[in-house]
Image (tube, helix red, strand yellow):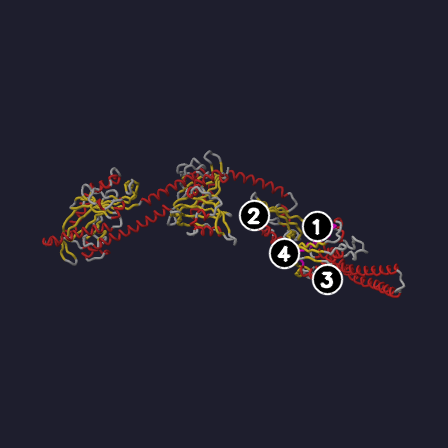
Amino acid sequence: MELTENNDFFETVFNSAANGIAVIKSLFNDKGEIEDFSILLFNTYTKKWIGDIEYKNKRFSAVFPTIKKNGILERFIEAAQTGVTANFESWYDGEGIQLWFRFTAVKQDELLIVTTEDITERKKAEITLNNALTAAEKQKRLYDSITSTTPDLVYVFDLSYKFTYANKALLTMWGKSAEDAIGKGLRENGYEEWHAAMHEREIDEVVASKKSIRGTVSFPHAELGKRIYDYIFAPVLNEKGEVEAIAGTTRDITEIKLAEEHQFLSRKKIEESEARLKSMIDQTPSPTLVLMGDNLVIEQINKHMLTLIGRDEEIIGMPLIEVLPELKGQYVWTQVQNVYNKGISFDQSEVLVQHNRTGIIVDYYYNLAYRPLVEDGKITGMIQVAVDVTQQVVARKKMEESETRFRALVNASSDMVYSMNADWTIMRTMEGSRFLSDVEEPTINWFDKYIHPDDKQIVLNHIKESIANKSVFELEYRVLNADGSLGWTFSRAIPILDHENNIIEWFGAASDITSQKEVEQIIKESEEKFRLLADLVPQIIWTGQPDGFVDYYNKRWYEYTGFEENEFGDTSWTPFLHPDDVDLVLGYWYQSVQKGTAYQIELRLKNGDTGEFRWFLSKAVPIKDGSGVIVKWFGTCTDIHEQKTITEKLEVLVENRTKELKRSNEDLQQFAHVASHDLKEPVRKIKTFTSRLEDHLDGKLDESASRFIERIHVATDRMYNMIDGVLAYSKINADLQKPTLVDLNKVIKNIEIDLEIILQKTGGKIHYHDLPTIEGALVLLYQLFYNLINNSIKFAKNETPPEIKLSSKIVTQEDKSLAVITVEDNGIGFESAQAERIFETFTRLNSKDSYEGTGLGLSLCKKIAERHGGNIVAEGNTKGAAFIITLPLKQNENDI
């Protein structure tokens, strides 16, 4: 099973992560902007941190309310909007706690993955360390200030008797600058031979005995003349207890020696000097303690040390071991005794000391410096300086624990995780790596042992290139497994660089891709079978990559074009397109590739031998995986030249016939106009002579004769109307009109005015409101609704005033907006079986003697609706008739 398919494994990794992980989804406001996130999932670490609350589908800011104030929510929103990973640190204050986190927000599709790392301890450790460094710098400045302002001469010799330090008082005595004096010996700084030789012997003695010596000497001062000095040489020991330098202090005791009467003044000066020393210790920023005597009694202690051990000044004068009895038996107490008893200086970092500071014994870590105090060559006490580094040590240990967890996670991987030295000659694998599992110890000959002989050179070339360019190494190659079998691996290694950009190590991972390679081989064999089959087909067959780049043609393509084999892509087929087809074909093709839709177009391709262009039908379909992603294009080109040629001939023939038909229609239109005029003339004469006959026989006609003459009048009127109807019906398709915006409310209002007399006569009413505005021909739409409303009045029931109601609604069909207008009445209606027949020309459902009309009105309505790209249907029963007209809101054509 692939690692990525193992849900249980990933759930375990997700919940065992040392940091908090949250999966959240964007929430949008009514403006489409992200304003917050909905919580989908927390890992175990986060759930423990927030406590036992129901968090799913809650707002992120509701569970963590302070993220709005400190800008965290704003950073998450920015990552979700831009897709750029956010990586930042921020304080988080909430419910009496203040923690520092590192947040990483990564957008994944519609989700945001937020990783939270608690770096509070590390931050506090950094702050403490920075404060300690600042204090140390301050302490150094204080020491420099003390040594520079003291009247005593302070200096340091190296083992070759050269000065490595001289304070301001000594330089003043010599009358030299530090640049002129430091690094030079006694004689170079003006000491007489006897004086220099004496001090060199004393330095040798201090080095040999590792004990201080004290003496008195007289030598000239650059400004004060001959003076008497008391001096002490003390050894400076390294961590091995070896003398690495000699520190000296010299005090001017001229006045003491020259005049005993000044003894009181000298004692006072000594006391003042001791007071200054005490003041210096009190002002030292580091915790400092002075112990004196065999019992190591606390003689001086500054406030920082008192805070460090959790005591008050009442402990001055008490033995240290009585103040801190828990030190007995600990490593630190042994070192205290060694400094006092053996004069061995002690300097060590991160020393574990268990002591009672706040009422209970706790582990603390200190950077300690102990120095013996020597008087007259005898150790009389010691000075201690301690810096609390507990927070830094605890933070580092936590980082080490985190690294251990990281190693455990790496070891849980099925891949082999390894490291190489800078030149790839030595391999080390992480414990538990499965792949090539016998490589548990550093392997020097790994290259010869595991790389397949046929792949060694290419692997070696890639290694050399990566080393030379300091670039990532990535390669698939064959390996010899631990059990002797042959396999494939994909290896990726990253160079680790030092501050000078030199490679110090390589870190990488190797995946077993043997199964993948076997599948690729099966696919390759399948492709070969496909190609053999494709070469037998008379059509041109091709395949393309997801971006549309053609990567295969069958044999038919090369036979037709004469093109060189194995040349693919757009450059292999566009030169063979007809120049008039290039832009159209490329436009269709690139649109299909972009949208992932099927492609079909007719195009002309040039024959490589004859230069003739032939018509082809080109088709292509995208092949998609289970998730809908295109993985391949498959296409064909079929020769349709013969069919296309016949079609073109037919199109020419149809065009000629259309022209003839148009000419015939125009002649017919002219004939209809003339015929209607000529037919009207005899009808008018019949009506005229009938009227004259009626006048001539006025009073002489009986009832039957009058009824016959009346029928002649009715027949001639009907004939006259029928001739007008035929002319209007024939002209409805001949007169093209430009579409305009037509407000149907205004159209019905005008019809209502035109039919005002007949409406008043019959007591009829037209009801309508909020009818739509559509594009159309105003004259035709007026005629459409006039005929329908006039019909409703004409076919009203006896003794029943006509009620005509118009209503409308807007619908969408096939992405097209349509207006559906219904005209209903309370007339005589018709049988539903006659709903289609009433739109036929000259069709009448009722007696022509009972109802006037030509039978052309509804046929005309149907033609008008169809001219507008719509339709009309009828519904009827004994309660009335209803006509439903469907018309588009917008016209696609320029003429109607």
Which is in the foreground here, disc 1 or disc 2?
A: 2
Which residue is more in the foreground, 66 or 755?
755
Which is in the foreground here, disc 1 or disc 3?
A: 3
Q: Can you identify the residue that label 4 sits on? A: 579
Q: How many marks?
A: 4
Q: Are marks 1 and 2 in contact (CB under 8 Å)?
A: no
The tag earlier along the polypeptide, 1 or 2, is 2
Measured in 3D between alpha carbons, the distance from the residue under mark 4 to the one under mark 2, in whole angstroms, is 26 Å
Measured in 3D between alpha carbons, the distance from the residue under mark 1 to the one under mark 4, in whole angstroms, is 22 Å
* Left-right relation of 216 to 873: left
Q: Type of residue at label 3?
A: Glu
Q: Residues within 10 Å of mark 4 (few under 14, many from 20)?
A: few
The tag earlier along the polypeptide, 4 or 2, is 2
Q: Can you identify the residue that label 3 sits on? A: 756
Which is in the foreground here, disc 4 or disc 2?
A: 2
The tag earlier along the polypeptide, 3 or 4, is 4
Q: Can you identify the residue that label 2 sits on? A: 546
The tag earlier along the polypeptide, 1 or 4, is 4
